[in-house]
Image (cartoon, rainbow, N blue to C red):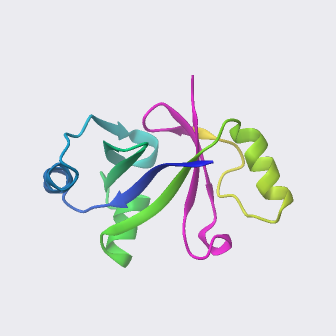
Amino acid sequence: MKIEHLGIAVSDFNSAIKTYETLLNTKCYKKEEVLSEKVMTAFFRTGDSKVELLAGTDADSVISRFVEKKGEGLHHVAFAVDDIHAEMKRLKENGFRLLNDKPKKGADNKLIAFVHPKDCNGVLVELCQDAD
């Protein structure tokens, strides 16, 4: 596995984009709304990985609640996998709790599933597979 991206929860989407464009010295290459998650995303390439900014589009979204409770900051670490179904099965067999019974469509043309942070030393882990 390799780190696919780091997900960072933000409160001011446009301001955060400008900050990360300056910090990473690169332009945001993609903005996408994920309606099912009530979130706007912005992606930046950095080396072989990416940074994803996430801003809630509704006060009831997971990201909005995260920012309200914990403040802005690291939300999740995403790992690229070749076969998300096999990886979910392997993790379940090893006692990890998954937050999804099956993969769902995520941003950036990915199938995604999440591993409970209580099973990963407090870190929310996302599994990502290209949807193509």
Question: In the displayed structure, would residue 28 be above or below residue 59?
Answer: above
Question: In the displayed structure, would residue 35 be above or below residue 16?
Answer: above
| Image quarter of residue 105 | top right
| Image quarter of residue 84 | top right
Judge by depth and name the residue closer to the eye, 102 or 42: 42
* Residue at the farthest front position: 47
Q: What residue sits 74% from the left and 40% below the top?
A: 85
Question: In the displayed structure, would residue 121 be above or below residue 98?
Answer: below
Q: What residue sits 63% from the left and 70% below the top?
A: 120
Residue 94 seen in the current view: yes
Q: Position of residue 129 (x, y in %)?
A: 59, 36
Q: Position of residue 38 (x, y in %)?
A: 38, 48
In the rendered structure, the answer to whether residue 77 lies left or right of residue 17 reads right
Q: Position of residue 114 (x, y in %)?
A: 60, 55
Q: Please check the rendered image and state whether residue 41 is part of the magenta-colored stretch, yes or no.
A: no
Residue 60 seen in the current view: no
Question: In the displayed structure, would residue 22 be above or below residue 105?
Answer: below
Q: Which residues are magenta?
A: 105-132
Judge by depth and name the residue closer to the eye, 34 or 49: 49
In the rendered structure, the answer to whether residue 86 lies left or right of residue 25 reads right
Q: What residue sits 27% from the left and 61% below the top?
A: 10
